[in-house]
């Protein structure tokens, strides 16, 4: 199982009334409950930060033992004129890594996926991950 992970609106609310990455414990809960799940970053943060920096962002403060579960990031397709099409970036990663198993994208922007995408779990970006999301995500990946 691959979880394609967005940051903004998932690991912290968009409005930033709370600190960045304030929902990390919920991500860690998902990963600890689903030990076969791996993470691939599909966030726009990958355009600014190095992979090792992003790993530290999502593991610092209690999730350090989960760092080995982060296995990459999706490519940028901007040069191909496909910027903002996260579903195509995910498919490109899946193809390049010969992954044919299950996957789920955790994102707050369904508009950057093709309509009705079955492998998308939409998080309310004004709140970020919630306990209810954790239960629903685990129900889909277990």
Image: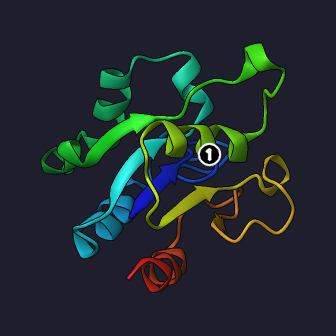
Identify which residue is drawn at 63% across, 67% down.
119
86 or 13: which is nearer to us?
A: 86
Can you give x and y, in whole percent of width and height, for residue 53 in the image?
Answer: 34, 22
In the rendered structure, the answer to whether residue 7 lies left or right of residue 21 reads right
Identify which residue is drawn at 46% across, 18% down.
49
Colour scheme of the rendered structure = rainbow
Residue at numbered disc 1: 91
In the rendered structure, the answer to whether residue 54 lies left or right of residue 12 reads left
Say which quadrant the C terminus sits in: bottom left
Regarding mark 1 in the picture, which secondary structure is present there?
helix
Identify which residue is drawn at 51% across, 46% down.
94
Q: Is residue 138 above or below residue 49?
A: below
Say which quadrant the N terminus sits in: bottom left
113 or 88: which is nearer to us?
A: 88
Identify which residue is drawn at 60% across, 38% down.
92
Q: Is residue 125 above or below residue 68?
A: below
Can you give x and y, in whole percent of width and height, for residue 78 in the image?
Answer: 75, 19
Count of numbered tags: 1
Can you give x and y, in whole percent of width and height, for residue 22 in the image?
Answer: 44, 50
In the rendered structure, the answer to whether residue 18 lies left or right of residue 53 reads right
In the rendered structure, the answer to whether residue 70 lies left or right of residue 3 reads left
Can you give x and y, in whole percent of width and height, for residue 69 in the image?
Answer: 25, 49
93 or 36: which is nearer to us?
A: 93
Residue 123: quadrant of the picture: bottom right
CA neighbours of label 1 inside 10 A, class few (<14), some (14 to 19), many (20+): some
Q: Is residue 14 above or below residue 81?
A: below
């Amino acid at each position: 199982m691959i979880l394609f992970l967005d940051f903004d609106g998932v690991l912290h609310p968009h409005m930033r009334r709370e600190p960045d990455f304030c929902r990390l414990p919920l991500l860690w809960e998902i990963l600890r409950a689903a030990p076969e799940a791996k993470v691939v970053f599909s966030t726009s943060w990958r355009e600014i930060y190095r992979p090792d920096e992003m790993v530290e962002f999502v593991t610092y403060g209690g999730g350090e033992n989960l760092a080995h579960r982060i296995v990459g990031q999706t490519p940028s397709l901007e040069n191909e004129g496909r910027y903002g099409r996260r579903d195509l970036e995910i498919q490109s990663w899946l193809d390049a890594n010969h992954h044919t198993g299950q996957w789920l994208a955790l994102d707050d922007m369904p508009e950057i996926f093709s309509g009705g995408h079955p492998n998308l779990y939409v998080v309310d970006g004004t709140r970020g991950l919630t306990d209810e999301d954790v239960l629903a995500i685990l129900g889909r990946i277990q």
